[in-house]
Amino acid sequence: MSNRDPKVLFEASRRPREIPGHRSFLRRARQEHEQGREADSQLSLAAFLVASLVDRMLRLTGETGDLDGFRWQVRSTRHFVRELPENHAERAHLVALIDTMDDELPLDLAGVRMSLMAYAYFLNQESRLENALDVLELAGRSHRDGLPVEEFASFAMFVGRVLRRLASFPPAEVAYQEAVNAARSAGDEHTELFSKLGLANLYRSTGNLRRSQELVEEVLGRTERAALTDVRAAAYSDLSAVYDGQGRRIEAVAMEYQAFLASIDDAARWRTLANLGASLAALGEYDAARCALEVVAARSEVFGSRTNAIIELLGVASAVQDELGFRRYLHEAASRLDAMPPSMAVDYHYQAGVGMARFGSISRSREYLTKGLALAEEHRLNTWYFKIERVLRGLVACPDDEMASRPAPGGVDVSSLGEIASGLREFATANL
């Protein structure tokens, strides 16, 4: 099996080259500065300097003047990074990267690559998605002879996941399909199935629920072996999302609960529990939803899972007319807005808009919902677009004091959810 060039994964999403390069870190530094977070702004500038250093390393010619300039850049970048507060987890990744680029030749490309991948994983977990994509492209370029097919499959799946979360759907589809093909060629069923779930998630996000369900059910049919338990848990969760999109709400909750029971690691467990809480809230099962979501908000160390839980708690608080809780969660969610990927940012604006309406602030509700609608349109999040559009039409049609007194969503027989609610209460008692 021949090596494969990672460049194919970035060509479809490539924008005109920015001068200077790695401007995603500079944009982040500016945003942090505008929010008054100077330490985080300096950290972002440090990340820009380190990414630029790696870029220069990959372009070294071997000439004496070129090497001398590179060595000076290593020393100056190291000095800047070591001046940052030591309590930042990201600083440790930057220090590790610099340490792999010492003054001796030949440079340790394998060590640089491993540090880049670890850093990209961290950035993805923190929802610094443009930064993660930037670092992944550097990691791909460090494979000067291409990647062995089995490594390429995992790398392509990672790229596809970041692009999907950025709502860059066509290039994400290319990356996922490359991952499926490479994994199948290498006999790596685990990566092949996870890549197919990535495609299913992508199709669901763009409104193709039928194709999404077909892929998820295909994956579930191949996960009977114990070694694929984590794939099965993810597939149950994805099938839950498909059912929810089809209006099959009780079935959606049942599938999410199966995903929760099948989860074998904390990151997957908190992510699934946040989804389960959101599904229960949509059914009006607010006590059970709060049990699930508060555990995630308190225990998860992953930005995405914790932030999703906070956004859903925002919705729960407004549904039960807990205005104090609503204001608290609104403030906490707003402080994370700059780091939210597009779909999460749309969800935040939706929950904030609905909550404002429930508390009688219709004009503020329109502001949040209109912003969410614009984001959904910009990123082609079709399901979200039509959902918010329907709510906005309802605001226009009713007086300013009517929406505040509307009841929570109902009309669904939730009597079969007792066992799930009981299980979640026991779990929350043991974990809070």
Image (cartoon, rainbow, N blue to C red):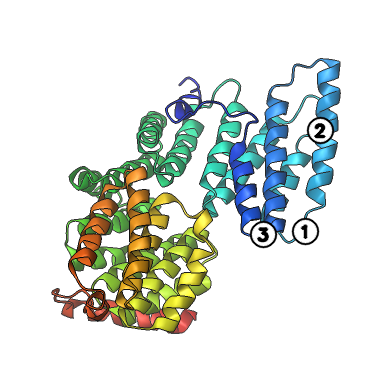
Mark 3 residue type:
Arg
Quadrant of the drawing holding the N terminus:
top left
Give the labeled residue for mark 3: 37
Which x, y percent locates residue 63?
Answer: 81, 15
**Circle 3 residues within 10 Å: few <14, some 14–19, many ≥20:** few
Q: Nearer the viewer, residue 102 or 129?
A: 129
Q: Is residue 369 above or below residue 190?
A: below
Image mark for residue 272: none
What residue does disc 1 label?
85
Tell me which residue sits at (24%, 57%) in the image: 387
Q: What is the spatial separation of the Cα atoms under label 1 and label 3, in whole angstroms?
A: 13 Å
Disc 2 marks a residue whose amino acid type is Gln
Is residue 246 visible from the viewing direction of this image? yes
- What residue does disc 2 label? 73
Q: Looking at the image, which residue is at 28% across and 76% down?
A: 420
Of the image marks 1 and 3, the number of the one nearer the N terminus: 3
Q: Position of residue 138 (x, y in %)?
A: 60, 32
Query: Quick one: label 1 or label 2, which is nearer the N terminus?
Result: 2
Residue 243 x %, y %: 20, 58
Whether residue 207 is situated above or below residue 244 in the rendered picture: above
Judged left or right of residue 3, residue 275 is: left
271 with respect to 93 (left or right): left
Q: Amino acid at mark 1?
A: Pro
> What residue is shown at x 51% (from left), y 70% (from top)?
332
Q: Quadrant of residue 417?
A: bottom left
Q: Label 1: how many residues lie within 10 Å, few (<14), some (14-19) or many (20+)?
A: few
